[in-house]
Amino acid sequence: MPKSLGTAAIGAILAAQMAHAETITFWTPEEQPDRVAIQEEMAAAFSAKTGHEVEVVPVTEKDLGTRMTAAFAAGDMPDVVYHSIQYLQPWAEAGVLDTGAASEVIEALGAGTFAARPLDIASVGDGEYASVPVDGWTQMVVYRKDLFEENGLAAPDSYENIAAAIDKLHDGENMFGFVAATKIDETFMIQVLEHVLLANGYSPVGDDSDSKLIEALDIYKKMAAASPEGELYWKQSRELYFAGKAAMIIWSPFIMDELAGLRDSAPPTINDDPTSRELASRTGFVTRISGPSNPEGAGWADIRYMGVTTDADTDAAIEFVNFVMDEGYSYILRIAPEGKFPVRRGNASDPEAYVKEWASLPVGVDRKAPLADIYPQDVIDNIVAGLSTGDRWGLNEGQLNRASKIVNSLLFNRIVREYIDDNISAEEAAAMIREEVAKIE
């Protein structure tokens, strides 16, 4: 072919590609500048591959619901939205999310490559999904594995084992058996409470029985009794654990890099070296707790999804989500590896490809290191596996929206604090909770 014809042919191909190129809008709550920069890199890589342009629009997480409601009313929604678990059911029911588009992405990528529980949560029946699960994290019992082993204690994966460890390790001076959340105006307290109550199979929107609730209240009171006095939340639990004065706390995985001395603003103080990995080496993690009324147990999970809206340029939006969840997946995981566990474990070539990649990504702030260099493989496997069984109030009952209102009201914080302060009995606390929950629709 003459050179001039070759150039013309190439020009025609490029012109054809540009003719089919679209510009799609992508809303993301990951709005910190460094996180936006990673997502813009991801958008640029997608554009280079497909010709489609992507406008990355940061939206403050607390404003996402009201912004979407307004955009839905105006017929001006984004093409793709990166959203939390709380919007799955409400947006699917309202017609915000294109369930057919999400289902097409999951089918193309292979449902078997995703963790099962995040897919189950997104199911809307008839083999369709509201949105595509992207990443998540599970709340964890963080515990002194070395002290447990020295004292012949089983891992704190049940009410029984937690109680036994408190009895053995708590002395109230040099070592607190637990640091429970007790500050009633902190959302941290309700997150911890929901985790503990889920473990016993209790949900305020799905269980009329007080027995599960009372069993859970009793273990929480024991945890609080083994804690220091005062208004406790995430700050004190981390400080006491880092100082070597707490046997167990409940925290998010964002503590994992700090345990290894990678963040100067939150250094371990168990020894004289704030950059030491000693505490990380002594620490174990449990993502799933069981109670006497729920032997299988449960964990508290925060899962993020990517949805195609009903206003979208559907074909281009599907292409984008496919890209994000496949060759572009590392961009998402890089945003914050310690809090973005891979929901999609691997692909047809390697069923563990993305778990391996995630474990090799550097974490930390002032110093960096991959999680796989800090923690043994069984720890990595355990925390990722937690997403396969993670839960939240209202998911199983299809009442996620109501459960979110109950959580946001902080009624559990207030009443549970009355109980652990011995102002009311467990039976009175359960009755008060039942009465307050009934007022929330």
Image: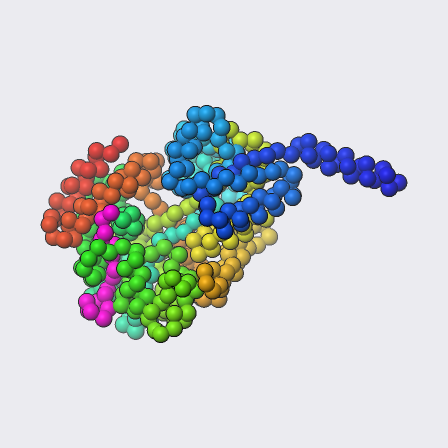
In the image, residue 385 sits, relative to residue 105, either above or below, namely below
Residue 431, position as x, y percentages in the image: 15, 41
Q: Name the quarter where the N terminus is drawn.
A: top right
Q: In the rendered view, would you say 173 is above or below 49?
A: below
Residue ID at (31%, 42%): 393
- Up the image or down, 211 lies above or below 440; here it is below
Q: Identify the residue shown where x is 41% and y is 30%.
A: 69
Residue 120 rendering spot, x and y as whole percentages? 42, 42
Residue, x 50% and y 51% (percent of image)?
34
Q: Is residue 206 visible?
A: no
**408 or 301, which lies in front?**
408
Residue furthest to the right in view is 2
What is the magenta range?
169-185
Pinpoint residue 215: horizontal percent, then vertical percent: 20, 51
Q: Main secondary structure of the magenta part?
A: loop
Q: Is residue 12 above or below residue 137?
A: above
Q: Is residue 142 left or right of residue 21?
A: left
